[in-house]
Amino acid sequence: MPSYAFFHKQFVPLAEAKIEVMTHALHYGTAIFEGIRGNWNSEHQQIYLFRLKKHYERMQNGCQVLRLNLPYTTDELCQITIDLVARCGFQEDIYIRPLAYKSAQALGVRLHDLETDFLVFAMPWGRYLDVDKARCSVSSWRRPDETPRAKISGLYINNALAKTEANENGFDEAIILTSDDYVSEGSGENIFLVIDNKLVTPASYDNFLMGVTRDTVIKLAQNELGIETIERHIDRSELYTAEECFLTGTAAHITPVAEIDRRKIGNGEIGEITSRLQEIYSEVIRGNNPKYLEWCTPVYKKT
Ligand SMILES: Cc1ncc(COP(=O)(O)O)c(C=O)c1O
């Protein structure tokens, strides 16, 4: 299947979408990105874009922070994305990467007096963490303090350092702490523990990206399992003694964590609550649960 991009206000084959070398965002990370999943349902012969609008609302907020003047409304961004995926015609799980960026051919660290452009492309992408259960390590790299609450390209450098450190030490994913030693998030996921049969996750003051999947999981746990989520500081040692642990993200979905810093979590197998949430989540994102269809945008028109 050919992949396309929406680039410079038109649809072009992905291979033809090229950025010029002086592009401001390339040098200073002055961009906001998103990650959106398209989930293939073979029975319905349909791709469902999961919580499309919520992702673009987060992007619009980020653009406001970075003074990126997007020439599109949230509804227009959603429509461009639907048209893009329809054009690609994929029949498998995909990942969509929108980017709003300072496109000016200009050097100099700043946000003002620089043009903005928007691009989005879609590509097939299966599992992000390609394991049934992840082995994690707590990173020596910290989540920087005092950063804007936005998915800013330039902010991802500590996450990249943490991820590579974890992988090169033989782990699947890094868990990043705040500067005051509380658990913050994974390098590309939020984190949940199960303690006393309740979900526990870092609270907004723990300086992580407020995930769409995090929000989905909190709602599904409450609505479908009657399990409440407590948002609070989490100490590093609580990671080791939790009954269960899992990571959540658009790319990673719900990934169980079996081990942290060479300590088994629970019995080292996928925990019961994690596994029930995985099942519910996987039906919801594929448009198989009528209660949550408003979260699923179908791409292909039925004839
Ligand atoms: C650092 C970080 N935290 C958390 C998340 C989870 O966010 P979401 O569920 O919106 O994908 C992501 C994924 O984009 C991320 O990169």
Image (cartoon, rainbow, N blue to C red):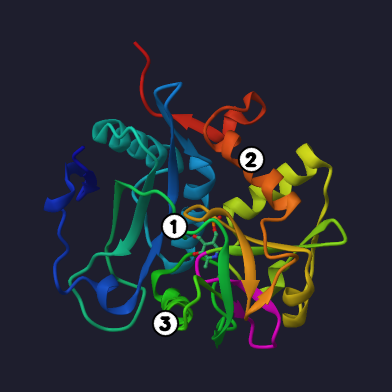
Asked whether residue 181 is drawn in magenta, I would say: yes
Relative to 273, is 288 on the left or the right?
Answer: left
Front residue of 56 and 170: 170
Front residue of 295 and 236: 236
Three-letter code, disc 3: Glu
The residue that disc 2 covers is: 279
Q: Is residue 283 visible?
A: yes
- Mark 3 and mark 2 in contact (Cβ < 8 Å)? no
Residue stretch in magenta: 176-188
Q: CA distance from mark 2 to mark 3?
A: 31 Å
Density class for disc 3 (Cα within 10 Å; few <14, some 14-19, many ≥20) is few
Q: Residue 168's mark?
A: 3
Three-letter code, disc 1: Tyr
Q: Residue at x 50, y 75 (%)?
A: 171
Q: Residue 115's mark?
A: none
In the orientation shown, which residue stands out farthest toward the top? Answer: 303
| Residue 88 percent location from the top left of the image | 25, 36
Front residue of 16 and 185: 185
Q: CA distance from mark 3 to mark 1?
A: 17 Å
| Residue 105 percent location from the top left of the image | 17, 71
SS class, disc 3 = helix
Q: Residue at x 68, y 65 (%)?
A: 268
Which comes sooner in the sequence, label 3 or label 1? 1
Q: Is mark 3 within 8 Å of ligand 1?
A: no
Density class for disc 2 (Cα within 10 Å; few <14, some 14-19, many ≥20) is few
| Residue 213 percent location from the top left of the image | 59, 51
Which comes sooner in the sequence, label 2 or label 1? 1
Relative to 198, is 80 on the left or the right?
Answer: left
The residue that disc 1 covers is: 128
Q: Residue at x 27, y 84 (%)?
A: 108
